[in-house]
Amino acid sequence: MNNTFSFNFQTLVFSCLFLISTSFTQDILAQETDFNAAATAELEVDPIVAKSDSEPEDKRIEAWKEEAAGLGIPVSSYSDLKGIQKGFYPVLATLATSKGSSKLIRRLRRNGINPISFFHPENENLYICSGRYEAGDDAISAAKQIALEGRHRIVSILSVEDDAYTPDEPGTFAAETSYETNGINLSAAPVKASAEKAPNAIIKRANQYFDRMWYADAAQMYEEGLERNPEIKSPEIIQRVADAHYFNSDMERANFWYEQLYQVEDEDLSAEYLFKYSQALRGAGKYGRARRILKLYDKKLEDSPIGRYRRDELLERQATLDNILDSEDLFAVKNLKVNSEYSEFAPAFYEEDKVVYASSMDSAFFATRRYKWNDQPYLDLYVAKMNEESEELNAPIKFSKSINTKYHEAAVAFSPDHNTMYFTRNNFGKKLRRDNQGVNHLKLYRSQKINGEWTPAEELPFNGEDFSTGHPAVSPDGKQLFFVSDRPGSMGETDIFAVDINEDGSFSIPRNLGTNINTEQKEMFPFFTGSKLYFSSDGHTGIGGLDVFQAAFDEEEGFLEVKNMGKPINSSKDDFSFIVSEETQKGYFASNRDGGKGDDDLYSFERLFPEEVNENAIAGVITDKITGETLPDAMVELLDENNILLKEVISDMDGSFVFEDLESNTKYHLRIRKDTYAEKDQFLQTYENELVTADVPLSKLEELVTIEAGVKKLKTEMIYFDFDKSTIRDDAALELDKLVAVMQEHPGMVIKIESHTDSWGPKEYNLKLSDRRAKSTRDYLISQGIDAERIESAIGYGESQLLNECDGSVRCGRDKHHRNRRSEFIIVDM
């Protein structure tokens, strides 16, 4: 499957027609976009305006040329202009390439001009004109009207004097593009390339193919053009040929060209292209090099403002990938006999013993409709019977004539009773519908089975004309519908969303599944079992292209940690549309991995070993330290040993909490907060599939005020310092935060800080060190919002107030000396 970083079209079609990269906002499935590319389509243009009178031709020509000269409008005349119909064309713009033409044409249309466009066969520029006229004076009149109304300036008048138009001329290049304007379809006619001009012409044509997302043809033409004329190689062309192979899932050639781009750009290569390069290396099985490039990608992100906040995530990426590659195979997979030389993917369980899937096999006609991305037939839905023993899919037939159309249908899901189906289809009525950029998006449809027949499909209400919606998945209870979209509000290129299915068949507002599932890249092909969500992604850490991931579902916490399914479900290529029976632990998925029969093949799988149950958990009860009463609504945070927040829960009405599905033999940190209570920290470690209990008593803030030897103090754990240091340690910061909470609870409280050292070192030095520690403690409290006026003093006493006998006259261990390095807090006023 060609993932937008590496899919072939057929899956991209339904794998997402969703954004391919930041530079291709129009790359969306099944889209036949009207770009300004030269065309093989016939140039059929009816006269817009007939000749107005019967003046002698020479006088008429002389008159309109004089008028043009008087208006300062240049006239360019051509005869025998191959592929362009005879007439007069007011030129609004000439462009060296088609880049930016779509935006210009949209602006012209907003200004009431329906432009036509074509490539000039001699100078190879793109001409955008207001129309075609039979007479020169009519062209001048139109030009004056446009200029007087301020809608656009006229660059020139193009006069084609002899009709050399011959459609479908042999030997011409075959790219299709047209702009529809008031019933006129003016397409660029076929253009022959002379031998001496061939390389540049080939690159231009390759660019046009690329802009239309015909990546297979574009890649071939770029290769041919560069081979014939290597001196025209530039970073822009290298980037495009690499991308063409990348989007067509040819990772070997993509890797070859990205390597050349990297050699040219070096440190200036963008994060986007470093990511693509690493993906191509993975797809080619070159994991060592992929790791090195991925580190550069991470560094590029880390150096950016947003990247600095993702440092921990980037540090974990490599370790995760190593674990995936080193893990043992948990599944046996098998390529199915039902696969053809084309694409088969997106399986869905149907009734007791059937599977419905998408295929471009097109068994009815061998050379019917074909999509130009990879010259494969359009997708249809097929149904086949499962063999319980071999897991093969037998006797496939087309699913339903009322569902399959002449365009794409794929990615289907059924209600639990199998009487309602949801599926993905191109947005079309009598013909493909496009947004204002010419993009044909995907939509979700629903059909009901009545008396054994599927009703005509109805469009779902949360589709849109300017974005794609597809890849449905229904929850086992039939109450939720998951889907994929690139709609506004998406976090990445494509995200997974969910809606509630109401009893009357209506839907809730779509909700994004959030950052735990969705990344800045692509997530697609969800499948939900009720306890786990399976999906494909190229944003989570994987081994190449799209990988299959799973996330356990908890009723209270939602979706938990995302985990890679590992080998052999995942490969260096695209692996997607995973479905499984939790009862049998058997299922199907699709992949374009090496060794298949077609572009995308269906595979069956069976788990080799029973799935391990992770019983690692931390559970406890929050109570009041004095009364023993349970405390509901306390915030309990789970952090790792680096104080990075992993999860958080609110204690139940009985004060209980639990964190499940934790790692074995791992250190964790609990932090508990509740209003009017002092914050509590507790440190624990998990073992092997064991429940660790952590009952937590909380003290009220006022209970932290105590009297020692007639002196009122704030009772906290000792604020310790490292030897010969005055910086605030992490454990000291936790205790100082409790002090901050007490002082905020009692705004009239005033304190003084006393800091002490051990007896190591000279007394004079220790006195100065303790004073630095007192000042450091004071500064920390002020930094947390405590008014400096509420700290009467911060004084160091050196080694003059030791807590034990370790004054240098007796032998003491480190721990005893450590106790003397502290700060204390005396309450001056409440």
Image (cartoon, rainbow, N blue to C red):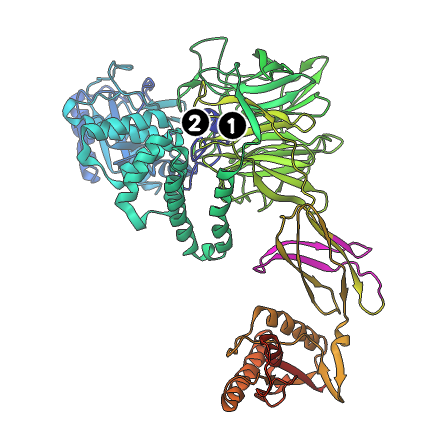
Task: Report, in whole angstroms, how far the alpha carbon at label 1 lies from the one at label 2.
Answer: 11 Å
- Where does label 1 land, which residue? 14
Q: Residue at x 54, y 32 (%)?
A: 329
Q: Position of residue 366 (x, y in %)?
A: 44, 9
Does 663 appear above or below 41?
A: below
* Residue 655 to residue 195: above or below: below
- Percent of width and height locating residue 285: 40, 34
Residue at point 49%, 13% (across, down): 362
Which quadrant would residue 460 be assigned to in this image? top right
* Amino acid type of the residue tagged 2 in the rendering: Asn
The quarter of the picture where residue 710 lies is: bottom right
In this view, the residue in front, 329 or 556, is: 329
147 displayed left or right of 586? left
At x 79%, y 58%, the residue is 632
Q: Amino acid at mark 1?
A: Phe
The C terminus lies in quadrant = bottom right
User: Who comes first in sequence, dot 1 or dot 2?
Assistant: 2
Q: How many marks?
A: 2
Q: Nearer the viewer, residue 61 or 471?
A: 471
Dot 1 and dot 2 residues touching (CB under 8 Å): no
Q: Which numbered dot is residue 8? A: 2
| Label 2 element class | loop
Q: Is residue 759 left or right of residue 61?
A: right
Magenta stretch encompasses residue 238: no
- The span picked out in magenta is 628-657
Query: Could you classify mark 1 by the number of other residues whose Cα lies within 10 Å: few (under 14), some (14-19), or many (20 or more)?
Result: many
